[in-house]
Image (cartoon, rainbow, N blue to C red):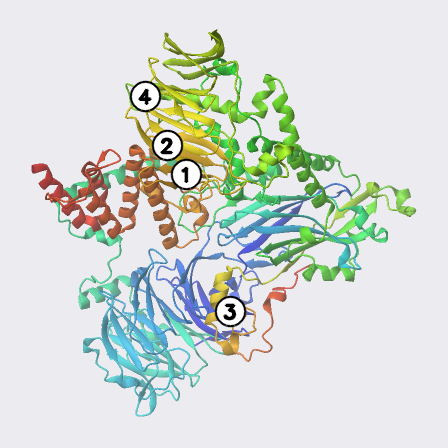
């Protein structure tokens, strides 16, 4: 028996050997945190390896635990290591394979961690110190016990899901062991009981108290163990006639007739060798193997360890605390910070049986273990419904197809090692400064988005997203104003000429136009500072000339007094000062710039007045799309995005000095289009439709008349109005114009007046048409929408006050959906639509919404192009969905959080599509949501959806149920949902229910 | 263990004229996505005598930081010579790169910097008033001095909970990350936040 010691100064509370026997882990107290260390086994086994300096002894140290680590346990597969500590946490570790040995920066080349083990899950639930953790056979579950008197069963397939919390102990739970067959788990606690729980329903099977009656709660741990053949459970710390024992509990009837006696103090730990042994007959010629038997080690507070073979023992003496057996050796750790290794010869213990032989013993004794049924094994569940079977088969076929497709693809794909987006790391480094995304936060600070050069090998995300995309965050406002217009609709090449002549008429001062100016100043300053860097160094000073000075040395280690807080403000640096000045300058420049530009000639206009220009473009564009829709399904919705700015009092005062002193009124004022001599407005190009306005063309009897001309595919009509026309709008159904004296007139496509002039409450700011809906936004920031065909009001003089609460907020874009729902996109990235039935402004989109960035439902997307669902919601929110891309950032976030955010996001989307009455998008998001519910197994919500879609099967008068939702028949939607539901065998009952009831309805 | 560890700092364009901006290419690894930005600073020590002459050349926020390895170039303008004592213009000083999370400094990378005249004549007879335009800055890039500090990486709410759950007799007054150490006499439960985790491994 060889014995060697690894010394360590702090207590070690747990040790566990990796299943492959090449390494072992220890857990205990570190410097000022808990510490887990993974050690190399070979220096322990071989004296030569111990002396060889090239063979590392320590493989990895993890000091993530905030407090003492009480237990470390390898999973049966050896893939994971679980550790539990006084910080109430359980951490699950996995080896990161992508990085080899690494040095610690600044540590002069000394190897730090030979292997990289990373925490892949942190399990938080216990309210007290975690005392023991245990992996179930097959690694399906992880159990943990704590001084909070509970045992928690975690789903090891889906951390951090909790499958069960076993309550029943009335004292600190200090040890856990799984039945090797997986039917039971046993726990031992300070309450003088040992409890056995069933894994089938997580209920108590038995509670054994008698052998523990005399026990006092004096042990730190109570590590019990189950024999690998499953026959015996051996407890820690039992008493028999006032003597400390390890109680043997028979599986058969939980009898407690035998115990291990001999220790002088309490038994703290029992550990069976995971192998089953058999002994060859030594002297006989016929090698008749004896009965298989198990081997067990018992450790006690009397500082001794005994090893028992088939319960006939020989005694070893050593300090011990916790141990694990692996094959023929035992590792023992102790409070004195040492780990001892005990090596047994095969003669002493016998020959271990192979795993197959072991499982054969299990099978012959207990039959096939049904207790452990993981999610994957659910597939063996009986399918009760033939339709269900059909969907299951189809799904399997699809998976096969996908698999073969993906293997084909990966065949040609290059490996990504050391290459990011097709660039080598060297290329990236060369251009990093140019490429890295640098922005400014709201308070003017520099913010750099780091380039992600490697993903952590967590295994949770198969796809690597390399380029970090900045979260919209505080920048959303700026980004929106520059992005929204071009992003919405691409410019049609045929249109620019037609509006080139049209004069922009809205008043200047657009917040958006000032921002690019600010940006360019920043860029300039950047460029300026980077130029001197080009100077080449001439003479290289030798480092030896640099003599360290003691006064300076201290600066390396001591935290500077200047650093905490916001030093950029307290100690004024020249750069900060300049930057501040620049910003002030930009601010000062804004009004002047704009005033100048507004007085400039037309050719400068596109630069300074993007809003008015884009408005024209967009109107044209929208109508183009609108016409195209006839004959075939719409590619785009009939929407009219318009950029305009709403002037808040703040900007107004800046602009008009006369108003400077007046107290900022609460009233919002929107820009008013000024009167023009004449203008042309292209409504659409296919079919070509444009409106021409000529103001005060003729004078009849002292009255000046203005002419409105409309040309639609060559057919022209014209009419006259008595006052000057300020703005016009048109759709395929109506043409409307707003005149001076707050008059609004509406004409049919043939020029027939549909309504007597409408008197607006205040001068017009923006006019809009979609289909038969006319929307007027007045200078007083009130909004009205009418349906001129049905001659009803949809939105009545609704104020924008509630959504423009902030003084700096501007409306960056307006939409009117084909259902007459107005949507306001604001400069802060939020978009509100007015819900006429509730008379409320509803938030339908928020660029800063973190949910959108966290939600990950890629797995629920039916195909790649499924994201390209067009409609008002897509236009408001922007096409590029963040799904998944941002989710990749969260891959260390617990799955539950991910689920919650995804659910919340999808629900938001469904609700927003409903509010916008966008049936196409509603269907899209509802299906996506349902698919996610199915994939993740959320039954209640799924059931509720199905119930609502199905409605009452039998007619009842009191029913409030509507058979349609946003023009879609609910039961048709349910039929679409059925195949989705059928994909998860868990929901086969729900599937069958819905299908049967739909059948009943069909037969009626 | 820190959630963020610095893998490497490469000193770019070194040596360079005094007025050139500092450029450091910083690679770091993050073990768990960070909720908030990291704040990096470059501090130029104007004089060994006093921290008064420290200049924060620049500070940047770096984020978002998901789990993984990342890199960026931190560029900052040269120090303002008018804030450097004339006697300290030529010779050895220090430049520090610090990183803070939630206002807590967790790493400090320091380099010796030598400023000297290239022109041998000037070197022999340095002018009374230093001519910064003639100075060359040489950062001793091969010898970074790294100091790491323990900080609380979790958000404040967790911290508060930790306080509440702690045994009042033990927990009160102690820093949050300092949980009682089991089985030890606790020889002066030191304030971990203020002690270097591993005091500089240099040559």
Q: Which residue is mark 4?
A: A629
Camera-side residue of A971 and A159: A971
Q: Are marks 4 and 1 in contact (CB under 8 Å)?
A: no
* Disc ID at residue A47: 3
Sequence-first tag of 1 and 2: 1
To which residue does mark 2 refer? A872
Q: Secondary structure at mark 1?
A: strand
Q: Residue furthest front?
A: A701
Residue indicated by mark 1: A832
Q: Which label lies toward us, 2 or 3?
A: 2
**Helix, strand, or loop for circle 2?**
helix
* Above or below A756: residue B78: below
Residue A443 visible in rendering? yes
**Residue shown at 38% from the left, 84% from the top:** A217
Disc 3 element: helix
Q: Earlier in the sequence, mark 4 or mark 2?
A: 4
Question: What's the chain of the residue with tag 3?
Answer: A
Residue B68 place in picture, x, y as percent: 50, 49
How far apart marks 4 and 3 lie (CA) works out to 82 Å
Residue A671 in the image: state x and y as whole percent: 52, 29
Residue beneath the point at 69% across and 41% down: A579
Q: Position of residue A75 (x, y in %)?
A: 37, 62
Residue A677 shown left or right of residue A900 in the figure: right
């Amino acid at each position: 028996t060889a014995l060697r010691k690894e010394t360590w100064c702090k207590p070690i509370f747990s040790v566990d050997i990796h299943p492959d026997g090449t390494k072992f882990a220890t857990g205990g107290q570190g410097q000022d945190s808990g510490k887990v260390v993974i050690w190399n086994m070979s220096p322990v086994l071989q004296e030569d390896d111990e002396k060889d300096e090239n063979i590392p002894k320590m493989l990895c140290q993890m000091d993530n635990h905030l407090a003492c680590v009480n237990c470390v346990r390898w999973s049966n597969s050896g893939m994971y290591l679980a550790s539990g500590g006084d910080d109430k946490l359980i951490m699950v570790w996995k080896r990161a394979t992508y990085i080899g040995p690494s040095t610690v920066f600044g540590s002069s080349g000394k190897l730090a961690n030979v292997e990289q083990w990373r925490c892949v899950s942190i399990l938080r639930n216990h309210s007290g110190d975690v005392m023991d953790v245990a992996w179930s056979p097959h690694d399906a579950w992880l159990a943990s016990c704590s001084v909070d008197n509970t045992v928690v069963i975690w789903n090891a397939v889906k951390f951090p899901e909790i499958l069960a919390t076993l309550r029943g102990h009335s004292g600190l739970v200090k040890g856990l062991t799984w039945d090797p067959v997986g039917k039971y788990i046993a726990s031992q606690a300070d309450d003088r009981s040992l409890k056995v729980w069933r894994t089938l329903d997580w209920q108590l099977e038995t509670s054994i108290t008698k052998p523990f009656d005399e026990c006092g709660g004096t042990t730190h741990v109570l590590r019990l163990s189950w024999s690998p053949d499953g026959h015996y459970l051996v407890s820690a710390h039992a008493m028999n006639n006032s003597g400390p024992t390890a109680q043997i509990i028979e599986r058969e009837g939980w009898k407690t007739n035998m115990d291990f006696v001999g220790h002088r103090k309490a038994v703290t730990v029992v550990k069976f060798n995971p192998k089953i042994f058999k002994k060859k007959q030594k002297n006989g010629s016929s090698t008749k193997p004896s009965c298989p038997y198990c081997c067990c080690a018992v450790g006690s507070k009397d500082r001794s360890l005994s090893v028992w073979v088939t319960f006939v023992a020989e005694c070893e003496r050593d300090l011990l605390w916790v141990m694990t057996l692996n094959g023929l050796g035992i590792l023992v750790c102790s409070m004195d910070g040492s780990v001892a290794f005990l090596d047994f010869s095969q003669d002493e213990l016998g020959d271990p049986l192979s795993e197959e032989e072991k499982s054969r013993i299990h099978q012959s004794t207990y039959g096939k273990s049904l207790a452990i049924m993981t999610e994957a094994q659910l597939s063996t569940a009986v399918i009760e419904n033939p339709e269900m079977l059909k969907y299951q088969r189809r799904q399997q076929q699809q998976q096969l197809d996908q698999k073969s497709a993906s293997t084909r693809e990966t065949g040609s794909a290059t490996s990504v090692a050391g290459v990011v987006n097709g660039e080598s790391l060297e290329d990236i480094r060369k251009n990093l400064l140019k490429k890295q995304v640098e922005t400014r936060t709201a308070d003017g600070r520099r913010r750099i988005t780091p380039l992600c050069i490697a993903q952590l090998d967590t295994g949770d995300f198969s796809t690597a997203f390399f380029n970090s995309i900045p979260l919209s965050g505080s920048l959303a406002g700026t980004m929106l104003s520059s992005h929204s217009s071009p992003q919405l609709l691409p410019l049609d090449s045929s249109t620019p000429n037609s509006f080139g002549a049209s004069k922009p008429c809205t008043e200047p001062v657009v917040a958006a136009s000032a921002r690019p100016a600010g940006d360019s100043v920043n860029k300039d300053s950047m460029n300026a500072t980077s130029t001197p860097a080009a100077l080449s160094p001439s003479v290289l000073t030798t480092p030896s000339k640099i003599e360290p000075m003691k006064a300076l040395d201290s600066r390396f280690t001591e935290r500077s007094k200047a650093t905490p807080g916001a030093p950029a403000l307290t100690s004024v640096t020249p750069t900060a000062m300049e930057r501040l000045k620049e910003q002030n300058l930009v601010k000062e420049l804004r009004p002047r710039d704009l005033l100048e530009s507004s007085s400039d000639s037309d050719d400068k206009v596109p630069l300074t007045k993007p809003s008015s220009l884009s408005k024209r473009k967009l109107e044209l564009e929208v109508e183009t799309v609108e016409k195209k829709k006839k004959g075939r399904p719409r590619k785009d919705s009939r929407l009219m995005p318009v950029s305009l700015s709403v002037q808040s009092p703040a900007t107004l005062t800046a602009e008009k000095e006369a108003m400077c002193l007046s107290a900022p009124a609460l009233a919002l004022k929107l820009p008013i289009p000024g009167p023009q001599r004449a203008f042309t407005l292209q409504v659409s190009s296919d079919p070509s439709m444009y409106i021409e306005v000529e103001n005060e063309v003729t004078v009849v009897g002292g009255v000046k008349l203005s002419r409105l001309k409309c040309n639609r595919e060559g057919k022209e009509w014209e009419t006259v109005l008595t006052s000057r026309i300020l703005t016009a709008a048109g759709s395929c159904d109506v043409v409307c114009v707003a005149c001076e004296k707050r008059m609004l007139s509406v004409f049919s496509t043939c020029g027939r007046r549909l309504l007597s002039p409408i008197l607006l409450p205040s001068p017009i700011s923006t006019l809009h048409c979609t289909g038969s809906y006319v929307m007027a936004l007045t200078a007083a920031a009130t909004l009205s929408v009418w349906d001129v065909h049905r001659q009803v009001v949809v939105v009545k003089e609704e104020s924008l006050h509630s959504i423009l609460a902030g003084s700096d907020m501007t409306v960056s874009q307006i939409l009117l959906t084909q259902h007459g729902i107005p949507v306001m996109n604001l400069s802060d990235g939020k978009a509100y639509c007015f819900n006429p039935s509730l008379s409320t402004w509803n938030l339908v989109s928020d660029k800063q919404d973190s949910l959108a960035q966290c939600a990950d439902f890629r797995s629920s997307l039916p195909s790649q192009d499924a994201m390209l669902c067009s409609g008002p919601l897509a236009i408001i929110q922007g096409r590029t969905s963040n799904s998944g891309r941002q989710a990749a950032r969260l891959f260390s976030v617990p799955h539950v959080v991910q689920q919650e955010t995804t659910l919340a996001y999808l629900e938001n989307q469904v609700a927003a599509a409903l509010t916008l009455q966008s049936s196409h998008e509603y269907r899209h998001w509802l299906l996506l949501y349902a698919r996610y519910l199915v994939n993740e197994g959320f039954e209640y919500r799924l059931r509720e959806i199905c119930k609502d879609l199905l409605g009452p099967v039998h007619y009842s008068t009191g029913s409030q149920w509507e058979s349609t939702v946003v023009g879609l028949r609910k039961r048709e939607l349910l039929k679409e949902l059925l195949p989705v539901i059928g994909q998860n065998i868990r929901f086969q009952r729900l599937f069958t229910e819905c299908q049967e009831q739909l059948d009943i309805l069909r037969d009626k | 263990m820190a959630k963020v560890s610095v893998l490497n700092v490469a000193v770019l364009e070194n040596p360079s004229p005094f007025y050139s901006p500092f450029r450091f290419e910083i690679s770091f690894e993050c073990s768990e996505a960070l909720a908030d930005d990291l704040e990096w600073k470059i501090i130029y020590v104007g004089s060994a005598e006093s921290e008064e002459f420290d200049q924060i050349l620049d500070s940047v926020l770096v984020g978002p930081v998901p789990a993984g390895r990342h890199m960026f170039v931190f560029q900052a303008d040269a120090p303002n010579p008018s804030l450097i004592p004339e006697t300290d213009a030529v010779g050895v000083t220090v430049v520090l790169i610090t990183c803070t999370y939630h206002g807590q400094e967790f790493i400090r990378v320091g380099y010796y910097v030598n400023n000297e005249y290239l022109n041998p004549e000037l070197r022999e007879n340095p002018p009374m008033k230093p001519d910064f335009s003639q100075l060359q800055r040489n950062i001793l890039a091969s010898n970074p001095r790294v100091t790491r500090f323990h900080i609380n990486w979790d958000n404040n709410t967790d911290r508060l909970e930790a306080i509440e759950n702690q045994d009042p007799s033990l927990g009160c007054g102690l820093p949050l990350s300092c949980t009682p150490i089991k089985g030890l006499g606790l020889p002066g439960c030191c304030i971990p936040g203020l002690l270097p985790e591993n005091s500089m491994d240099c040559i």
